[in-house]
Amino acid sequence: MHEDREYDELLAEEGGAMNRGAVAKRLFRYALRFKKPLLAALLLLTLAVATDLAGPLVAKRLIDEHIAGVERPWYETAADSGSAYAVAYGGGTYKRGDRFTAGETRGAEARVLQIGKSYYFVAGAVAAGQRSVRADGRLAVTSPDGAEAVYDARKLSTAELYAFYKPEFAGVLQLCAFYLGLLVLSAGFSYGQRYLLQASANRIIRRMRLDVLGRINQLAISYFDRLPAGKIVSRMTNDTETIRELYVTVLTNFFSGGVYLAGIFVALFILNAKLATICLFILPVLAVWIYAYGRVAKRYNRTIRSTVSEINGMINEAIQGMPVIKAFRREKTTEREFETHNTRLFTFQNKLLSLNAVTGHNLVGFIRNVAYVTLIWYFGGASLSGGAGIVSVGVLYAFVDYLNRMFNPIVNIVNQLPNLQTALVSAERVFKLLDEDGEAVSDATVPRFKGDVAFRDVWFSYIEGEPVLKGISFEAKQGQTVALVGHTGSGKSSVLNLLFRFYDLDSGAITIDGVDIAGLPRQGMRRHMGIVLQDPFLFTGTIASNVTLDDPAIGREQVRQALLDVGAERLLEQLPQGIDEPVIEKGSTLSAGQRQLVSFARALAYDPAILILDEATSNIDTETEAVIQNALEVVKKGRTTFVIAHRLSTIKSADLILVLDEGRIAERGDHESLLARGGKYAQMYRMQFGDAAPAAAGE
């Protein structure tokens, strides 16, 4: 009951389970994109199986024709016949009955029979039955009805027995060479199919990962708000790698196993239809086995894959927040939280291990033993006794060989059942990500904006029914600077998120140069917009690559000029390699002020018509702020600039200041008029500057 509740909660968290048939169809469609190498691989696999399964038939012929064939009737022939199959013995010349040519005269019959480890020569025909050697050296044959016949027999020496086998050596060598050739062909086909299959699987997964990244680029920012980065990374790396194993290992074993089983049953029916029919019981047992295993293993695998994602997400979060963890002595708490997930993973992995142990080799061994018992019960004793003989020794050998070979693919299929279920769960998780609603990245271009921006009665909510912006309306003309201030949660960042179209508004309209941005391609409009965040993000690379973001249209001289324009001369002087100085993850080797200067240079290098500064100077020192304030005067020229700032000193020169309170514009105006009004803005100003506020108001 507890497991069922946990499973239902997991399904609810992941949005419900996908139909396994639908998952399989989508995996098949991915495979069809590379159908030529896959079909070639499957053809080579079929040839490899066919050449491999031909081995027992070759061995059967070798045994029946050239080894056990010595017990077939022999006949006297002319001593001067010159035949390679003629054998001289006891003053006469003998040749096996099946070696005579048409029209060749046959003499008296004789037999060479094995009894125990010895061989005996009998002049004349011998009845079928149980053989034994009497104390007087004569051969006794007991028929199935109990009647006994006695024959004079002479024991053959090693040299004499060798003479009877010598004519068959040429045929034995030919069959051995043929068998060796089959092994070489099988090895070559196996190599070819493995190479093609793995190369195709790698191409499929490369395509799938590109699709996942493409979908991630199309997803709205809100998706990343609700799903930790570690879980997304897990789907793109761990889950796709598991799917790769599906194509490389699981499908190979299932397909080769199916071909092997089909080929073996064809061979068994050729050898003995009755026993082959009895052995067909293996197929329904295997089908029921796979179905039952899948139903139970699916629950465990879904929990395991989800828990792995949880662990990845937690580790990612812990690494990102390591300074906070250490500063607040949260190491032990983090370990306990991790151990909760780790124990859950351990528990369900053990449950899956127990399931695999119960339904693994034990069941295969049981089925194998049942098949062997059936074989022995059916004709083993009679065949080995040399009596009436249900089958030849060669057929018996081939049957045992094929039964042995039959269980190898069954074991391989059974061993891949855990991987199959894991891959299906992983594919389900990947396809759920690919099915998320997104917007295709457009290459459409938009003419450069003049920069006239207008919000008209804009309403917006992150959670339905809980609006964070309520009827926002204002206008910003080209070249103006608009500042947004207000307490935390008042909606400042939401205004700019809507302008940048990170989110879509609930109602109202936002226009740029009179055009509703809802009708513009997101990528095209963002080409003319720049943003500088409070905590700038730098990518692994160099200073130059972080300014250009690898845009070939921005040259090295533009990079240097952008850095100089934002006052980064000292930064460049301090870096041994200048703009080619390496930057590691998140720019951790640079100070907050240096990272912010690079971020400003990035925005400037892209020459935006609309510039957004989201508390861009809140995390830097006073000296750097002064440098950036000077640079901003250069950056803002001819551009419409939106500024979110807690430091009111940085926005005194703004053309329009909007004071937001609980999602509404409480006040609007320039610095002087708002101070004169004595409202919320004046109150915020006094809180920051204390006694200096009145003086500022009288400036």
Image (spheres, grey):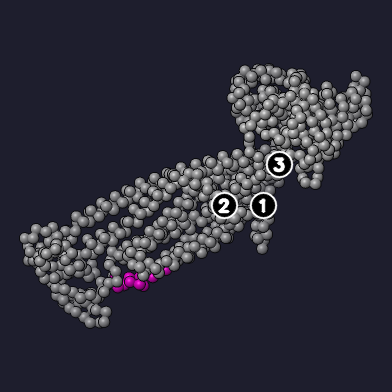
Give x and y (percent) for residue 489: 81, 38
What amino acid type is highlighted by mark number 2? Val
Q: Earlier in the sequence, mark 1 or mark 2?
A: 1
Decide which of 520, 466 is in the foreground and name it: 520
Figure check: 602 above or below 344: above
Asked if residue 13 is among those painted magenta in the image, a careful observer would answer no
Decide which of 436, 224 is in the foreground and name it: 436
For residue 187, side relative to residue 468 (left or right)? left
Q: Secondary structure at mark 2?
A: helix
Residue at 49% in and 41% down: 203
Number of numbered discs visible in the structure rendering: 3
Q: Secondary structure at mark 1?
A: loop
Give x and y (percent) for residue 89: 10, 65
Q: Main secondary structure of the magenta part?
A: helix
Give x and y (percent) for residue 446: 67, 29
- Quickly name the residue at label 2: 23
What amino acid type is highlighted by mark number 1? Gly
Q: Earlier in the sequence, mark 2 or mark 3?
A: 2
Residue at 71% in and 46% down: 333
Figure check: 27 above or below 219: below
Q: Quadrant of the C terminus?
A: top right
> Which residues are drawn in magenta?
370-383
Spatial distance from mark 1 to mark 2, Cα to Cα? Answer: 15 Å
Spatial distance from mark 1 to mark 3, Cα to Cα? Answer: 16 Å
Q: Earlier in the sequence, mark 1 or mark 3?
A: 1
Q: Which disc number belongs to residue 15?
A: 1
Contact, mark 2 vs mark 3 (Cβ under 8 Å): no
- Quickly name the residue at label 3: 222
Report crowding for label 1: few under 14, some 14 to 19, many 20 or more residues within 10 A (C-alpha). few
Residue at 45% in and 64% down: 283
For residue 202, side relative to residue 227 (left or right)? left
